[in-house]
Each structure stands twice: as structure tokens, then as C-alpha cells.
Amino acid sequence: MAFYTYIMASRRNGTLYTGSTDDMGLRAWQHAQGVGSKFTAQYGVTTLVWFEAHETRDAAFHRERQIKKWNRQWKLRLIEEMNPGWHDLTERLSA
């Protein structure tokens, strides 16, 4: 079983949300539907723009906490390295 750390965005260079989960597809769908969290619903954070898999829940949670401490520029660089077009990566989950 994989665990994930992820970043959602409202738009390119928009509002960002970092989280971790054991079901990336479900969690991305929840955010897209506005039921993922009050924060993402309020700010329209619906696009999965970055994610990485981990072997343990603890590793995914630790990475989430690490990224949340980063400054915004570091987060933007992380997204740009994996997803320069800021495309919704939800389709990659089923591939």
C-alpha cells in the first residue's frame, strides 16, 4: 500500500494546500468536489499539481510537515520541477 504527500492549487501560482493521504484518488476527488477540507473549499483549491508516494504513513506525514514549513518559492519550485504546466495530475493516478 502506498501513502502520498500532495499539493493542491487553486490555479497556477495561486493558493496552495499541502496534505497527506493513503488514497490519493479519493482525496483529490474530495478536494475537487469541495468536500476535502474547509480551507480548500473556501479558496477553490481543486487541482492536484504535485504528489509523491511513500512506503509508510509516517513518511508521508513527515514529508507533509516538512513541506508546510517551506517558504512559498520552494513549494512553487517543487511543483514546477514535476509539473511545469500546472496540469491536473489526477489522471496520472489511474495510469
Image: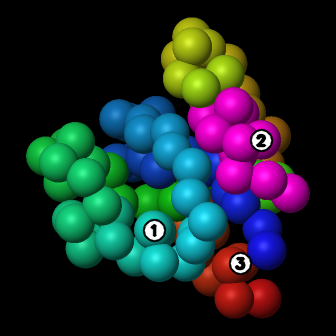
Give above or below for 81 relative to 65.
Answer: below
Residue type at tag 1: Arg
Please indicate whether residue 60 sits to the left or right of residue 9 in the image. right
Q: Looking at the image, which residue is at 42% across and 39% down?
A: 17
Q: Looking at the image, which residue is at 58% across and 72% down?
A: 23
Residue type at tag 3: Arg
Q: Position of residue 20 (x, y in %)?
A: 57, 49
Q: Where is residue 31 in the image (x, y as percent from the top left)?
A: 34, 63
Question: What are the residue bounds of the magenta stretch?
Answer: 55-64
- Please give the label number shown on residue 59: 2
Does residue 12 belong to the magenta stretch?
Answer: no
Q: In which quarter of the image is residue 41?
A: bottom left
Secondary structure of residue under mark 3: helix
Q: Name the residue under label 1.
A: 27
Q: Mark 3 points at which residue?
A: 92
Q: Which of marks 2 and 3 is nearer the N terminus?
A: 2
Q: Distance between the residues labelled 2 and 3?
A: 22 Å
